[in-house]
Amino acid sequence: MTAALLAGMTPARLDAIAPERLPALLRLMPKAELHIHIEGSLEPELIFRLAQRNGVTLPYADVEALRAAYAFTDLQSFLDIYYAGASVLLKEQDFFDMAWAYLEKAAADNVVHAEIFFDPQTHTARGVPFETVIKGLNHAVHRAHAELGVSAKLILCFLRHLSEEEAFATLEEALPWRHHFIGVGLDSSEVGHPPSKFERVFARCRELGLHIVAHAGEEGPPAYIVEALDLLQSERIDHGVRSLEDPALVARLAAARTPLTVCPLSNVKLCVFDDLTQHNIGALLDAGLCAMVNSDDPAYFGGYMNQNFVELFAAQPQLTARHAYQLALNSFEASFVDADQKRVWQHRLDAVFAAG
Ligand code: ADE
Ligand code: ZN
């Protein structure tokens, strides 16, 4: 990790912070979350409440039985349950309730800004209108700003296991709501569905002035990250942990400061790493990459933002206050807000670390 990347705090001041203070600082520090699938924040209790409200029958007896099914072997084994869980979402109020529950938890974790993924195709395929989805989410986003002081934006994700034609149709449906989301992403089953499959869809999205992000290098090879950069012109890479297998790619990502939205607990739950001691986020930072911590699908993977930070740092004692500060700073640098807003949050971050 290069000292040049540090902003208001000097390395010496960060090094003077006692290690015992680190867990409290991780919780207290302001941070942005840039990789959260709102459908992945649906807790089992809310799934059962919405199922009852909407008359949906679930193939699980109760909350405990559902939670017991959260033993994943890879990305696909998770996605099968994640899409089943989303089947209880039918009404605008359901989408509001889901997003509001996440935003309250984010506020409690000192997340000051969230760029939230949503998967419209998961819902429109079940006959839920796009309008229902976006209105419910948008209501929660606006209320969070007013009542929780959390700024939030929406990013529409295309499901990569579906076709290019279906992605284009979804974009068409979304256009009347163009100003309710800031960008588009690419998620779902990675291997076998390379970014090249959606090159033309993303070209159209860029013409529309949308921000571009894409999942790549979670389970898929570094070549998928290269495709996301070259063919989609992705501004951030979601996950990207497999980039370390390709030194030329690492050099490219570092030079361009292309952010990697890394999700430690997710990577362990989906068996990308055996456990948190093996996670490579420290190596990504030390290689000069703009990596930061995110929760991905917190209801399924064992925790929200602060849980990710606290468990990661507990598992890797070599991570210090410098790393904590850098991760928070990177989250602001990588966000799609203007430079003035980034400076405001950076000053808040400095104030927390200055108080030690
Ligand atoms: N959709 C929700 N979570 C995902 C993940 N971790 N990877 C790809 N698609 C997803
Ligand atoms: Zn994800």
Image: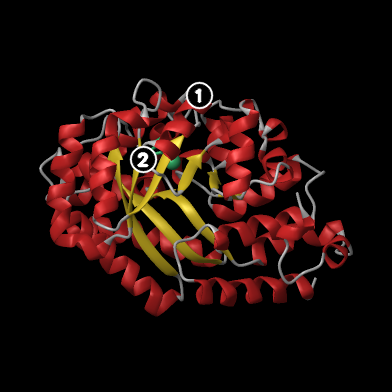
Ligand 2 placement by image quarter: top left
Rendering coords of residue 162 (x, y %): 23, 30
**Label 1 is placed on what type of residue?**
Pro
The answer, for residue 244, to whether it is visible in the render is no
Q: Residues within 10 Å of mark 1 (few under 14, many from 20)?
A: some
Helix, strand or loop under label 1: loop
Rendering coords of residue 269 (x, y %): 54, 32
> In this image, 160 relative to 216: left or right?
left
Judge by depth and name the residue closer to the eye, 257 or 141: 257
Judge by depth and name the residue closer to the eye, 112 or 178: 178
Distance from the alpha carbon under mark 2 to that under mark 1: 16 Å
> In this image, 127 relative to 141: left or right?
left
Q: Is residue 164 above or below residue 53?
A: above
Judge by depth and name the residue closer to the eye, 270 or 161: 161
Q: How many marks?
A: 2
Q: Residues within 10 Å of mark 2 (few under 14, many from 20)?
A: many
Helix, strand or loop under label 2: loop
Which residue is the site of mark 2?
232
Q: Quadrant of the C terminus?
A: bottom right
Which residue is the site of mark 1?
221
> In this image, 112 relative to 201: left or right?
right
**Label 2 is placed on what type of residue?**
Leu
Q: Is residue 43 above or below residue 230?
A: below
